[in-house]
Image: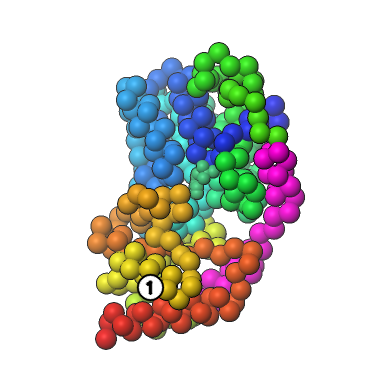
Amino acid sequence: MNRDGVIFTGGGTEGNILAILSLARAGKGKHVITSSAEHTSVHAAMNAVEREGYEITKLPLTSNGIVDVKLLESFIRKDTVLIAIQHVNSEIGTIQPVKEIGEVAKKYNIPIHVDCVQSFCKLDISEFSPLVDGIAVSAHKIGGPKGCGAVYLNPRRRTVPVFPGVTHEKGLRGGTIDTPAIFAFATSIENFHYDSERYWNLRKLLKEKLADTSCYFIEGDEAHQLPSICGLCIKGAEGQYVMLRLNEEGICISTGSACDINSASGTKAILAMGHGLSEARTFFRVSFGMDTTEEHIRKLGEALVKLDKEIHN
Ligand SMILES: Cc1ncc(COP(=O)(O)O)c(C=O)c1O
């Protein structure tokens, strides 16, 4: 990875859109591959290039919540100009096989952009960073300020700037950068600590608490799962209802990723895995942070057990 490729942005949304538009528009063909379970910002960029005449292939997820790399390879065409895949899914926390996808992209010399907003500072991205051409990250996911992030764009790849005629950030993003926010972002990187083992234990505890309920996890296998994001469903209860009832108990959860809160699209991952719409409506998301304790999980478990009993008795 060449540090000259780093551009500061107003967050992950801007990073994804900037990378996708800049890389796709620089290609000779008009075909892009992505997954159905990407963040809204990726879909927004895909919609923009689709309006410009590009064809978009959206891959489903397997029952394990990941992209099938062989299937992805089978969709590559002579005119494929970009592959855009997230590293960690914000709704269910599954980890995509980005290294394998990067190797496929390299074999065909196709640029690849990776949305690392949910994985930055939590997982090691160095195993695939030399293989990829775009990486978007966001400060507020690691305790930094909102409205700040960065995107890496491989300087060796041709790009078409989204902002015309600007000179800041190597001509790829206009405007004076927000130095205090970037300083705070750098500090949050230094201070952030992701204790994977602790989160696996909290996840295990939650599973134990829910063992005799109709509540179940939508997840990947251990090697492809971030422990701090739990995608859950309770049979027969809308996710919205579960969220409101837990709020009454002072527990904050969401029905999808926090940035999708105003849209009905917090269930892209479960739908991409082939689950039906009525099951997707029962989906809700629990995420652990640095301050989440075993006591919080016990309280959450008890509240869900109570809710499950109310619904099924
Ligand atoms: C996977 C993913 N990508 C992108 C974003 C957007 O980042 P930002 O809120 O910094 O615009 C989010 C936000 O939660 C996300 O989860």
Callout 1: SS: helix
Residue 106 figure quarter:
top right
Describe residue 109's horizontal placement relative to residue 281 as left or right: right
Q: Amino acid at mark 1?
A: Arg
Q: Quadrant of the N terminus?
A: top right
Disc 1: which residue: 245
| Residue 40: quarter of image | top left
Q: Which percent across, then down, holds residue 58?
A: 35, 40
Tell me the quarter of the image containing the C terminus. Answer: bottom left
Relative to residue 293, is residue 269 depicted above or below? above
Q: Nearer the viewer, residue 251 or 292?
A: 251
In this picture, which residue range is highlighted in magenta?
A: 180-206
- The image shows residue 3 at horizontal and vertical percentages of 71, 31
Question: Looking at the image, can residue 261 be seen?
Answer: yes
Q: Residue at x 29, y 61 (%)?
A: 281
Residue visible at 45% across and 58% down?
A: 92
Question: Which residue lies at the image location 34% right of the left edge and 65% below the top edge?
Answer: 239
Residue 203 is left or right of residue 70, and the answer is right
Colour basis: rainbow
Q: Tell whether position 111 is magenta.
A: no
Viewed as shown, does residue 189 lie left or right of 219?
right
Q: Is residue 267 above or below residue 145?
A: below
